[in-house]
Amino acid sequence: MFLLFILFLLLVIYVYQKWHYSYWKRHGVYQVEPYFLYGNQKEFANGTLCISDQLKKLYDEFKSKGLRYGGYYAFTKPTLMPIDLNIVKHVLQKDFGHFVNRGIYFNKTRSPLSEHLFTLEGDKWKNLRAKLTPTFTTGKIFNALDFRI
């Protein structure tokens, strides 16, 4: 009886994982086939690739297929990666208010430089953005680069 319970539990876990890892397929988005529990981060988790190389590999796969965007799994979390620059521009300029909380973990005591605009959330993000925005106007960037023709 106990063995049947364990087998049933394993079957339920397997079916749930298959269903969970088909999120992007169910929504009509191309996805890279994920690994059980690792999603598409297996090489990052076992230390063979750093996270930026792992994401670049996914980006290159989506781009080589001519896709405007693609889906992958950050371990168990479904994540959409925009490839088309018009989508990226729209998200960063018009819809940035919907994407302030990115869910990126950082530890400011172990790595103080990781507390930047891309990792902060909520009020801390808004305050830092308000401080940085006047610094990066088009005119100031143009003058800082000292273009000479």
Image (cartoon, helix red, strand yellow):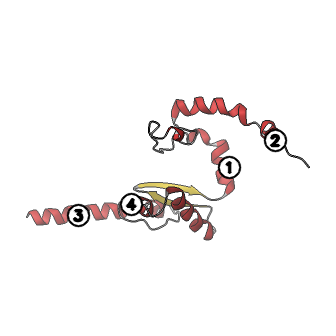
Separation of residues labelled 3 and 4 (CA atoms): 18 Å
Task: State the image quarter where residue 139 is shown.
Answer: top right
In the rendered structure, the answer to whether residue 95 lies left or right of residue 4 reads right
Which sits earlier in the primary sequence, circle 1 or circle 3? 3
Q: Which residue is mark 2?
A: 142
Q: Please tell me whether mark 1 sits on a helix, a strand or a loop.
A: helix
**Residue found 56% across the figure and 42% down from its top:** 118
Mark 3 touches mark 4? (CB < 8 Å) = no
Q: Residue furthest bottom?
A: 65
Q: Which residue is mark 4?
A: 38
Q: Nearer the viewer, mark 2 or mark 1?
A: 2
Separation of residues labelled 1 and 3 (CA atoms): 44 Å
Q: Where is residue 39 drawn, in percent x and y?
A: 41, 61
Residue 89's tag is: 1
Q: Which residue is mark 3?
A: 10
**Residue found 50% across the figure and 37% down from its top:** 112
Amino acid type shown at disc 3:
Leu
In the rendered structure, the answer to whether residue 63 lies left or right of residue 148 reads left
Amino acid type shown at disc 2:
Phe
Q: Where is residue 121 drawn, in percent x and y?
A: 51, 36
Separation of residues labelled 2 and 3 (CA atoms): 60 Å
Amino acid type shown at disc 1:
Lys
Mark 4 touches mark 2? (CB < 8 Å) = no
